Image (cartoon, rainbow, N blue to C red):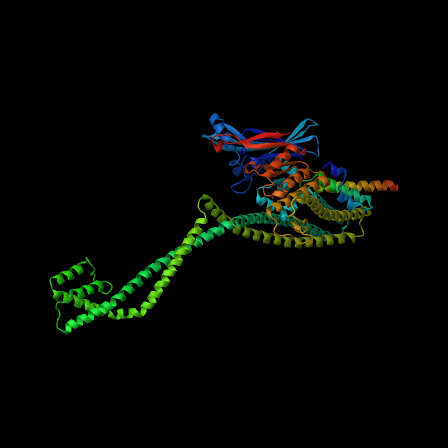
Amino acid sequence: MTFKEITITNFLSYFEDNRIEFSPMTSIIIGQNNTGKSKFFDAVNFALYGRVYDTQKENWVETESEISGLILNKHKINEALKENLSEIKSRISLVIDDVSNQNILLEIERSYTYKLVNGVYRYSTKNVVLSEIDNFAKSTYPFFGNDAEERIKSYFPDSIKNFFLFQGEAASKIMQLQKGGNFRQAVKEIAKLKLFEDAKDYAGQYVNSVDRSIQIKTTKNEKAKAGQKKRLENLDSKKEEQKRLEKKKADADSNIANYSSIKENCENVLSELKEFENWFDQKKEIEERKKRVQREIDGMNKEKTLIAEEYVFYKVKDKITEFKEFYSRLEKKGEVPPSIPQAEIRKALDCCRCTICNADLSVGTDGRKFAESRLAKGDTDKLGEYLRKLNNTVGDFYEDVVKVPKRLGDLLERKRNSDTKKNNLIHEEETLTQQLNTINLEGEESEEKRKKISDAKKKLNEYATLLERAQRESSKAEGQLEMVKDEISKIEKDLRSLVIGDADVRPEDKDKLRYASKLRDVMEKLFEVANDAAYKQVEERANQYYKEMTEENAAIVGDIKIDLQTSEIYTVDEAGNKILNINQGNRISIQLAVIAGILTVAQEQFGIQYPFVTDAPSSHLGGDNKSSTIKSMVNAFEQAIIILKDDTSTKNQKNDEFREYIRESSEVEVAYELCLSESKTINDQYTVVKKIKG
Amino acid sequence: MGKFQKDLPKIVQEVLKDEKDETVKTLVKSLLHGVLTNQNKIDIYPQIKKTLDDSFEAIQKQNKILRGEI
């Protein structure tokens, strides 16, 4: 199969008709970010499989409702509204050359129609047509709807779609290739193992039916006939059950591959955002710590105030004692209320107050004014009463006051410690504030990342559960399958022994049975050999391409290994040990090499050729093996359509190499550049396709 | 598919190289051809059975002719 041309009409970023012709060898589509590269890849996928990649969901969507909401070109909508067009279409037409039958051209046309209803274009109908154009007979055979879908699948089976249509940018799909289920399906399809498997099954069935016919002819005994019939019915029912279990297991395996891929994808997202999450947790912790420190500082301040008050309290104690003695002396002398030396009273007033009895006698207060006015008038009588009260109050507090000196040392020590601790805390707070300033986690991007982490964790849990369930189902189905196979084998053995033991079998029938059995044995062997050979050949070819792709990168070592039991793909070192910690770029190189291996084996062994279409495969690759990977792809695939990211904006030296390679390489016969139209708004921008070579 | 019909894959040749009996070889080829040309079709066993029966009968007839029985 060789892609000849594609016409993309009002599809995603493509406005009106955009025709791109392909070289039978290598065609390159180059463009900067958001110019429509992946949309081109979508167009090919849409044409062949009716699917479109939803970047929001990060997955392929296949339902009419999902696709119809995505594909119609926005600029076309605006233009059509201006012209008041009653109907518009989003359409892809793909023309394919059937290289195994040179007279036949295939044309796939897939379209979605939208009708104008109340000023809005609403999805109306979809249409798919496959036309087989026989150039020799000058006739066209069209297939419509489901017939067309079935026919397209016979040319491009579902199980190989992620291989020859390689989505280099979407990590989840890349990972999927390493899951046994999908890979096994693709090898089975592409290396025609299914053919051998079917042939083997039919050979087995043939032996049984020959057996059965002989048995019917030769079994005279009615009872034996009934027993035989029962066995055969039982055999049929067991075979049905086997088919059902095989399907159940295949579904579970496919789910395992799918769920593992989604789970791995979530783990990758979490791993990519791990640093951010750590910073975020650290920020939260620092903020909480800062709050704690602030609370401690507040506590310190409060304690300091308390200590200061107690200290003052202690200081006045001497004065109180002094005053008490003075007052006692006066009382003894009967001089209460004599004229008390004003200086003494003032002294007492100055210190014996608030902290003792809450009587505020400080300068300017009412209490002070009262005391001073009595002093001025020589009215010591009332003052004496006041002082007596004061004395009583002092007396009440005296016991407490005398305890103060004992605590004073502690208090002073605590005060000093508090000061030091407070200083340390203030310093710590400053440091934490500085740290917080370095962690800039505000803004929409941060919110988006936090949401992404939360979503990924949720999805991870969800799919881990689904995966466990699928693994249980697969394992259960496998166990049941083994049991059913054993039962089938027993019944078949039983049936065979019944026939061979019959003396009435005609020589021709005996011969037929003998050959049918031999045919079954050969087909079983053939399937076994084909199975091993397919994987071995793919492995050999893959290693050849892997070496070519990575020859400029000394850091990449090892050989690709395909586990025949599990179909797992990995690399091993010289000692045969599995190499762990393979980076993303290297992983893509491995997968590209394996795909090249599969497609090459398919072509060499069976003359089946698939075009290789890949979206931005080099974006994840390291600088050293970018160029060699592109060159290897050009060499490896009969027809390669390579979509490349143009990095001119980053002045990337490798990009200049690509450009030069496109210009100079004789293998690259056709190249197109994608850019955006100069429209006023982003919504109105569309892809402009320019042919730059060929 | 033309390539497969004309020239069976190496795998088939490899498995059949030690097979001396031409009848077996013919039956293998008939079976593979039958499956190949009916791929993606459902319930083709009756067709396959007929192909194998016809092949077998043709071989038997040819053998009888060679032995002078007919």
Quarter of the rendering containing residue A420: bottom left
- Horizontal side of A467 relative to A136 (left or right) equals left
Q: How many marks?
A: 0
Residue A508 can be seen in this image: yes
Residue A120 spot, x, y in % from top left = 46, 31
Residue at the extreme bottom: A332
Residue A554 spot, x, y in % from top left = 65, 47
Quarter of the rendering containing residue A294: bottom left
Residue in front for this viewpoint, A504 or A62: A62
Give the quadrant of the C terminus of chain A. Answer: top right
Give the quadrant of the N terminus of chain A. Answer: top right
Residue in front for this viewpoint, A530 or A613: A613
Residue A419 spot, x, y in % from top left = 36, 60
Residue in front for this viewpoint, A667 or A483: A667
Residue at the extreme top: A83
Residue in front for this viewpoint, A619 or A603: A619
Q: Is residue A498 above or below residue A104?
A: below
Q: Is residue A316 above or below residue A685?
A: below
Residue A424 spot, x, y in % from top left = 40, 58
- Horizontal side of A22 relative to A401 (left or right) equals right
Q: Residue sitting at 64 percent across and 55 percent down?
A: A479
Residue A146 can be seen in this image: no
